Amino acid sequence: MLLIEAGGSHRYARDYVAHVVFGEFLGLEFRIIQTNRPGWCIKCAGRRGELLLPDDFFSMPARMWLGHESLPNPPLAQWSYCLDDGHSSFRGILPVLFCQGESRLGRLTVAADSVRLDIDVLGTIFFMLSRYEEIILDQRDLHGRFPGGASLAARCGFLLRPVVDEYVEVLWRCMRLLWPDIVRKSSPGTVHVGCDVDVPYDCDARDGWRVLVSSVRDLIRRKHGGVIAKRVRNHLASRRGDYSLDPNHTFDWYMDACDKAGRRAAFNFIAGHSAGAVDGCYRIEEPRILSLMGHIHRRGHELGLHASYNSFRDGGVIRQELERLAATCHHNGIGADIIGNRQHFLRWDAAETADHLDEAGLEYDATGGYADLPGFRYGTGKSFSMWSWKRQAALKLRQRPLIMMECTIMSARYLGLGHGQEAADMMNKLKQSALEYGGDFSFLWHNSNLQHGVERELFLSLL
Ligand SMILES: [Zn+2]
């Protein structure tokens, strides 16, 4: 049992970060003791020794809390460390987000009965997991999203690193210096793959009218006649229930690949149109979609919610869409439990979206990445209980951070690396980084981006 002595300010936030770090990530029993002593002090019941950590973040003057002047100021100091426990050494360089007063050049002091680590590990982790900066900064892109490029992690060059996991590892190694036989929960990370079903089929081939309208459009644009012929053939085959000619109908290939790699994919469906056409051209009640959802469920893959464009600040919309998806499955004999979600366009408001998803009864969300940049928005690949700014407490809802979306890397709208070696290297590097400290690698790959051999090869390499 660990005894964690913590200062009195921001008690609920301190409880939260201790719960995630010591309880969820390290799997240790702990108790928090409120003190007036400055800094964090971690002891092990019935054992000698204490681990001392500074308390720069939570002990800031109350007037600064959630204000611009409380944000770290780039460029950040870098701490080059080497932790040696006699068996192995663990070394690296960590960005230092919070550091008041002197520069604390040593940062690590090991004595017989104490270890002093002069890095505010717990304050930094709260800063990352709560998305503190996203509450303060008002930059937003065209879709109202906080841009990855505006994050401290991107500006200081650590977005591609699971910096929270690295901080936890340093903390753990310091605890091991004091109590060499202490045991933590250890589980290797895994790969989570998800598919947001934005465009399940070629919408222009859905019915005769759409085929006609799109063909006229293509003629005006002087497109190759083959495009129109293909669409007509797809339309006629689809009417007979044969979807093999539809370029977006890659679901069986997707599931075969996941089965072979031992992965259970989550297919997230849009169950409402809060923003009209931007929420896709299908309805989940269509026979074709019902049959697809039943097929996915029977094959043992997961069905999830892809909450629509305008839902991220509207709990009522999220609840309605979840109920509609669950009821549609139920009435059609699809016995799937809908427990997961990802927001369409990754639209997210750190001040409230998690609360709405939690209130709707979802167990986890997988939105946690940026559309414009891949990497670790929360500084970790591990799933964790989300912080609620409204309730000042941990939610039941867990975040399963999204480390990359395929179009962020490939599409010209974002990084524009295409399908070549540079894209493959970046994707595989992200996977490696996510798994390095026992985190998970969660990625999103749309069914509509598997039409070419190169896309399929990249997808397979990540499974
Ligand atoms: Zn989407």
Image: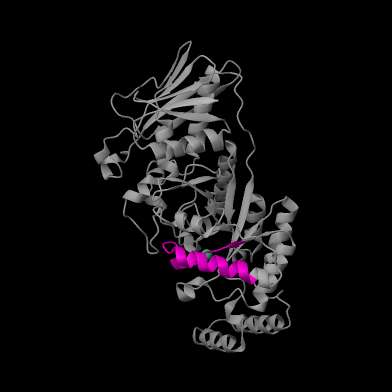
- Name the quadrant of the N terminus: top right
Location of residue 250 in the rendering, given as x and y in whole percent from the top left corner: 67, 67
Q: Total label count? A: 0
> Predominant secondary structure in magenta?
helix
Location of residue 376 in the rendering, given as x and y in whole percent from the top left corner: 49, 45
Residue at x 59% of width, y 59% of height: 445
Q: Which residues are magenta?
A: 304-328
Res. 198 visible in picture: no
Residue nearest the observer in this picture, 65 or 431: 65
Q: Is residue 340 above or below residue 433?
A: below
Residue at x 29% of width, y 34% of height: 60
Is residue 155 rendered magenta in the image?
Answer: no
Residue nearest the observer in this picture, 408 or 146: 146
Location of residue 323 in the rendering, given as x and y in whole percent from the top left corner: 56, 67
Dividing the picture into quarters, in which one does residue 349 lie?
bottom left
- Hey, which residue is sitting farthest top in the picture? 112
Q: Is residue 232 above or below residue 368?
A: below
Is 35 displayed left or right of 230 in the figure? Answer: left
Is residue 315 rendered magenta in the image?
Answer: yes
